[in-house]
Amino acid sequence: MPTVLITGSSGLIGSESVHFFVQKGFRVLGIDNNMRAVFFGESASTDWNRQVLEDKYGERYRHYDIDIRDRTAIENLFQAYSTDISLIIHTAAQPSHDWAAKDPHTDFTVNANGTLVLLEATRQYCPQAVFIFTSTNKVYGDTPNYLPLQELETRWEIAPNHQYQAGIDESMTIDNSKHSLFGASKVAADVLVQEYGRYFGMKTASFRGGCLTGPNHSGAQLHGFLAYLMKCTISGDTYTIFGYKGKQVRDNIHSYDLVNAFYHFYQQPRCGEIYNIGGSRHSNCSMLEAIAICENIVGKKLQYVYTDDNRSGDHIWYISDVGKFRSHYPTWEYKYNLQQILEEIYYAQVSRQTS
């Protein structure tokens, strides 16, 4: 039986990966020590999702409460399954700009050092395995903010006929920009993943995600834009819009569509690849546009406040150009659009509240 090891297995992308690969006939080893509750408080805990996975899949899903920075524990696990592991999906991370600035040491050790521990364990014990890393568009820092942008009624938009009209591709530089400390730690991890592919010939890829979202997201104010927005719309809690008149634009990709992209890469892997991956022109919105959709789905108005203090290094407009990935894997397609994503998030949150 093929075996996949998934870090952050109780989180959004990790748990989606568990569901996907169990259904493909894999045995899944999940690593998650619920650091999300440490980062964002008990309301962001992923323990509920771990319990769902264990109850649903039994022996097909084996959970390990391990910190990815614990080299000894990670190496012991890799060694125990060295002949079985054919795929590593690394989703565990400290994912917030703001939190990183509060505790740079933890942010960097989780995002960068933890990735190094996993890469080296892969090289030592299962070097033929495919290694997939969930990177971020924040590796480009604030460079996207210097693109020629136009202010429209509900969003910022790139100037017509610009080279990035279809979205930002992998040609954008990661240098000479302000990344936030979170972005810097993810750059370090991203480059390590590339280097293990190029230097050691390992089958590695960094997927530089836009907004990753879906019904299993434990959204919090500092991370999980659509899930937290929907949570506030349902509950009546006050939402805060940070800067840019609420017209900042993000592309949003459903967790299933991202994991399906991982599967395509796994089937025909390459060495040291980078891919921009997100909702692209297929699924994107501004904050104001997302609020309107949430209000329509829930049937009531969102209570929100606005502050001009945008988050440092935050993007004004970011849409991914997924053309490179499509050129390598032309059979990959989106399953979800923005409306479907938000409807799924709504029904999942209502279901959890009433269960």
Image (cartoon, rainbow, N blue to C red):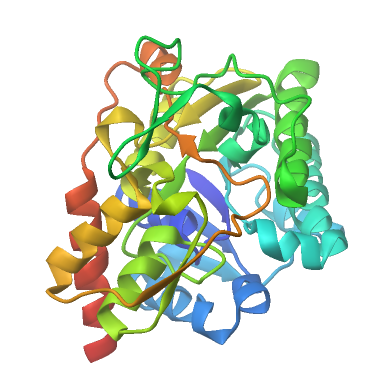
- The vertical placement of 274 against 49, above or below, is above
Q: Quadrant of residue 69?
A: bottom right
Q: Which residue is drawn at 31% across and 69% down?
A: 230
Across and down, in percent, residue 220 comes to 50, 72
Q: Residue at x 52, y 77 (%)?
A: 44
- The vertical placement of 237 against 27, above or below, is below
Q: Residue at x 87, y 61 (%)?
A: 105
**Horizontal side, residue 117 vs residue 1: left or right:** right
- The vertical placement of 47 against 311, above or below, is below
For this rendering, which residue is in front, 112 or 233? 233
Can the viewer see residue 316 in this picture?
Answer: yes
**Horizontal side, residue 92 vs residue 124: left or right:** left
Q: Which residue lies furthest to the bottom in this view?
A: 354
Q: Quadrant of residue 22?
A: bottom left
Across and down, in percent, residue 150 comes to 40, 29
Q: Which residue is drawn at 43% across and 49% down?
A: 212
Q: In which quarter of the image is residue 298?
A: bottom left
**Horizontal side, residue 81 vs residue 286: left or right:** right
Across and down, in percent, residue 139 comes to 66, 35
